[in-house]
């Protein structure tokens, strides 16, 4: 499980659409997004060379959004195999964005090498930025 | 201490490991040696590549520290050095924090606070 958070100088109402509006999403992650932000709707994000695919599980503006995440070409983490939960907490005029990524393939064993592979496309993109 | 043949001479970072893994043939090689130490010939038999091409892939993996090479008589045996993947663990942990840092930049650039600043 990965958990991380960030404080942003804007209200939750402002930050939330950055996880549901394709044009806003690609300002900070990926190159192209196809999003249908309602439970069961598509979450599709393309990095250069890698596709992250999933679907929205919960869309509760401006407090919480949950979507599944996976890499279609990777048997170790197919779409739907891991879940990203983002919680937006107002703190004065700021927002604390708390992100938890659950059910990633266990990575401490060499037998789960394919899990690494799935994340590499995105990682490489992130590194090259 | 003299490094064994095939051992990296110096510690390698995530960049070298990432470059080594950024090729489907090389990832396939690693899957083959995940649980078993294999000779080069047996690895090459899995690919529609020349022996020389497979040999080059093995060299890249060795230099990145991902693959261990052991000589047994005239044979060279290859296995995965799983500890070499540890730097990637660290990188993976940084994936979302980096993304959120970009989110913060993006939101705060598009929605600057309009509060009045005091005299400087």
Image: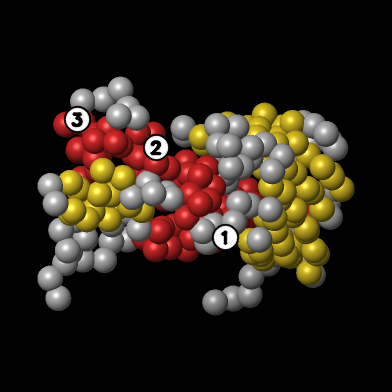
In the picture shown, does residue A20 fall above or below A107? above
Q: Nearer the viewer, residue A119 or A39?
A: A119
Query: Could you tell me which residue is drawn at 46 percent across and 32 percent down?
Result: A49
Q: Nearer the viewer, residue A11 or A128?
A: A128
Neighbourhood count class around disc 1 (C-alpha, 10 Å): few under 14, some 14–19, many 20 upward: some
* Mark in the foreground, 3 or 1: 3
Subunit of label 2 = B
Residue A115 appears anywhere in the view: yes
Query: Could you tell me which residue is drawn at 26 percent across and 43 percent down?
Result: B39
Residue B28: numbered disc: 2
Query: Could you tell me which residue is drawn at 27 percent across and 32 percent down?
Result: B44
Q: Nearer the viewer, residue A56 or B25?
A: B25
First in sequence: mark 2 vs mark 3? 2
Q: CA distance from mark 2 to mark 3?
A: 15 Å
Q: Position of residue A39 (x, y in %)?
A: 85, 37
Q: Secondary structure at mark 3?
A: helix
Neighbourhood count class around disc 3 (C-alpha, 10 Å): few under 14, some 14–19, many 20 upward: some
Q: CA distance from mark 3 to mark 1?
A: 42 Å
Residue B97: numbered disc: 1
Q: Position of residue A121 (x, y in %)?
A: 47, 41
Q: Position of residue A7 (x, y in %)?
A: 67, 65
């Amino acid at each position: 499980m990965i958990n991380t958070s960030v404080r942003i100088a804007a209200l939750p109402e402002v930050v939330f659409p950055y996880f549901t509006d394709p044009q806003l999403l690609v300002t900070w992650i990926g190159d192209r997004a196809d999003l249908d932000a309602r439970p069961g709707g598509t979450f599709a994000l393309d990095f250069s060379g890698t596709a992250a695919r999933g679907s929205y599980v919960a869309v509760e503006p401006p407090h919480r959004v949950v979507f599944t995440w996976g890499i279609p070409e990777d048997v170790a983490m197919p779409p739907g195999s891991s879940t990203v939960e983002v919680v937006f907490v107002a703190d004065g005029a700021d927002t604390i964005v708390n992100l938890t990524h659950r059910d990633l393939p266990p990575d401490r064993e060499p037998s789960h090498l394919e899990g690494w592979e799935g994340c590499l496309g995105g990682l490489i993109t992130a590194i090259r930025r | 201490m003299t490094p064994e043949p095939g051992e990296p001479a110096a510690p390698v970072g995530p960049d070298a490991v990432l470059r080594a893994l950024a090729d489907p043939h090389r990832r396939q090689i690693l899957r083959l040696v995940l649980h078993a130490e294999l000779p080069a010939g047996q690895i090459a038999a899995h690919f529609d590549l020349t022996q020389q091409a497979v040999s080059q892939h093995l060299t890249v993996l060795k230099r990145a520290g991902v693959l261990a090479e052991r000589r047994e008589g005239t044979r060279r045996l290859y296995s995965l050095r799983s500890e070499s993947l540890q730097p990637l663990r660290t990188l993976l942990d940084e994936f979302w924090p980096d993304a959120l840092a970009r989110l913060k930049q993006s939101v705060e650039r598009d929605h600057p606070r309009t509060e009045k600043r005091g005299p400087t």
